[in-house]
Image (cartoon, coloured by chain):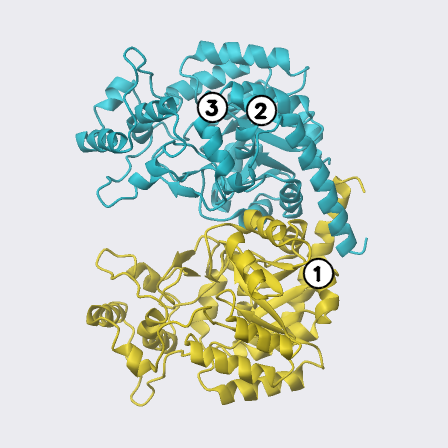
Chain colours: A yellow, B cyan
């Protein structure tokens, strides 16, 4: 399974794996794909620095990428304390009341954990600075084009830039800003996602940006048949995410057994697209937490970055509580196929093997 | 482009085309696919009978199918007058007020047209009776399994039965009822549709029903790349619908030029999934009419079959008014690719040619 992108990035397989876990990223890169470490969870740039040093040392010299969350325009900025004052009291009381109703206790004394600051522009910029001091081959941005000076900074370091797009017009704007690779993120994807499904979105973006801009298909990809489908639609590679959450390597990051249980048992219909995670529409696992936000008395979610600050403490409390019914987890519709915990290398081998079977079937249908 | 389904139905191409137009259905069948005539618009069984006689005479002896709209369980039944009494007055006044606000005049005196009764169980049964007196090779049902006795009636006549499914559990239930072919209808499809996108739904249903039950991929298919993708996902053929609305042949049925204009100019993001057409979620073109139903003062749509009776008169008025901004039209996200009016034969040839290009690309990626 080789496309031109393999040469661009020095990889064996055009399979890009977004993951918050350096263990998963390293295993994907070692298996021939491109592991892309999500930086948003690193509030402390030094911790990201140490983690990338670990990646440098554990990828057998293979390439990897780093994913940041950076809006094109600088939004409301400040420390969590400053921003916290912008959160309406009725939102805070709704969160407290909901956690109480769901039986999620407060964190033990002294274990108050900070919210995720990676959504803040200044923190995302520090992630780019730290990353470029290592050897990533790709900086990907979950929110579309990063600011043009960040793209130029990456290019000056010889690093390609990828950006997610949920519509052709966004892809065109990313290309105009200098982005090298477009990730066509379909409706079925986990996390931030638009309304157009991969089947329609991928060829639309491929045609819009033209043959000189490689497109990765994203959304709904967790088997080799889906890899073949995405490449048939015109993608040069695939961008995967959810499927790595139930790998053996991911469990090293994830101390939350309830989350793994919830993912393994969920069906493809058990997700919901909602603004409650960050303020922008993102697909999450459907749980009592997401249902509470759909109730009539629930407030409207706040804009980014306030919504994530609002719920970050709740996420920590639910994570510590470890109940599969009350978790907050971005995941795509492919969760219906994530039914066991397997090593990354096994998942990768399965993707390749099933892709080859699908390719043989297509060749047969075409009478080749 | 051949799969086992071609032998089952005596067709050259595993491309199934749902259409309310006998002109489109005949042209698809003549071009080697399977034209499937939507019967729901025929209030008068004799008119369906005459139309199927026309199809018998205009398909060069090639096979065709008939599509009915029949719930498994017999719902509220009766004439439009009986059922009309179940429609709340506030719904009627909302429809009147909305049409007035949108500048849609009443129909000219004496042109009051009846609503569509094909949604009624008794009418759908008469469609099956009439169809089986002709030579269809397939009865498809847009609402899942038809009643078991209807499946047996079709089988006794040597006719296969297909049913739409938006989730694997529904597909399994259809198979248990005796349905022969499952149409995996993804979120991106026009008309009645579930929430799971084709990329995830098609392989899930293929795996659920097993190798003995052929699956057609539906939703988002309007180009040969999408045909290849659907077959890569495990489908044995594709079920298309929207793409035929902008064919030359369709214009013979459609006197509404505004509708064609609206479809040609719409982008993939210009659809909405809503209950306002039939009471069940269906994807429609986004227009001022669909937006009016999203306003705060809009009532909740009524259950099937009442909602269609409620809006049928409004549909007739909007159709006569011929304004591209105020139409009510089921269509999928593929509408973004329907940018010109072309003959059916040209669309079919394009599907085949682009499928072959996609197959060649996949073979290249696989190093075959």
Cα–Cα span, label 1 and label 3: 45 Å
What label does residue B248 carry, if any? Answer: 2
- Residue at image position (58%, 78%) is A153
Count of numbered circles in the view = 3
Pinpoint the chain carrying mark 3. Answer: B
Residue in the foreground of this view, choosing between B226 and A139 = A139
Residue that badge 1 annotates: A352
Q: Are marks 1 and 3 in contact (CB under 8 Å)?
A: no
- Residue at image position (41%, 43%) is B272
SS at mark 3 in the image: helix
Q: Nearer the viewer, mark 2 or mark 3?
A: 2
SS at mark 2 in the image: loop
What label does residue B165 carry, if any? Answer: none
- Is B365 on the left or on the right of B48, as rendered? right
Residue in the foreground of this view, choosing between A297 and A213 = A213
Q: Position of residue B327 (x, y in %)?
A: 38, 31
Q: Are marks 2 and 1 in contact (CB under 8 Å)?
A: no
Q: Position of residue B193 (x, y in %)?
A: 45, 40
Residue that badge 3 annotates: B149
């Amino acid at each position: 399974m080789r496309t031109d992108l393999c040469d661009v990035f020095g990889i064996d397989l055009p399979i890009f794996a977004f993951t918050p876990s350096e263990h998963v990223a390293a295993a994907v890169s070692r298996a021939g794909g491109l592991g892309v470490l999500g930086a948003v969870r690193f509030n402390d740039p030094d911790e990201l620095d140490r983690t990338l040093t670990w990646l440098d040392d554990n990828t057998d010299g293979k390439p990897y990428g780093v994913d940041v969350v950076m809006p094109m325009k600088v939004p409301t900025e400040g420390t969590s304390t400053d921003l916290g004052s912008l959160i309406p009291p009725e939102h805070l009381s709704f969160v407290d009341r909901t956690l109480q109703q769901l039986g999620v206790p407060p964190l033990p004394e002294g274990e108050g954990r900070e919210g995720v600051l990676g959504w803040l522009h200044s923190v995302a910029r520090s992630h780019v600075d730290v990353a470029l001091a290592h050897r990533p081959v790709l900086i990907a941005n979950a929110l579309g084009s990063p600011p043009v000076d960040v793209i130029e900074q990456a290019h000056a370091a010889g690093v390609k830039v990828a950006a997610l797009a949920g519509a052709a017009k966004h892809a065109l704007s990313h290309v105009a800003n200098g982005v090298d690779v477009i990730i066509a993120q379909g409706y079925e994807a986990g996390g931030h996602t638009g309304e157009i499904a991969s089947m329609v979105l991928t060829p639309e973006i491929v045609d819009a940006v033209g043959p000189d801009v490689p497109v990765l298909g994203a959304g709904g990809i967790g088997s080799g048949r889906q890899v073949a489908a995405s490449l048939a639609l015109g993608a040069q590679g695939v961008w995967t995410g959810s499927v790595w959450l139930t790998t053996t390597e991911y469990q090293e990051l994830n101390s939350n057994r309830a989350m793994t249980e919830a993912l393994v048992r969920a069906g493809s219909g058990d997700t919901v697209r909602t603004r409650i995670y960050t303020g922008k529409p993102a697909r999450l696992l459907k749980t009592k937490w997401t249902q509470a936000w759909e109730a009539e008395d629930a407030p409207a979610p706040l804009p980014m970055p306030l919504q994530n600050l609002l719920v970050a403490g709740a996420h920590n409390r639910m994570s510590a509580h470890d109940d599969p019914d009350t978790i907050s987890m971005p995941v795509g519709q492919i969760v219906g196929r994530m039914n066991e915990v397997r090593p990354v290398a096994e998942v990768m081998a399965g993707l390749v093997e099933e892709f080859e079977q699908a390719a043989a079937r297509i060749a047969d249908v075409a009478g080749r």
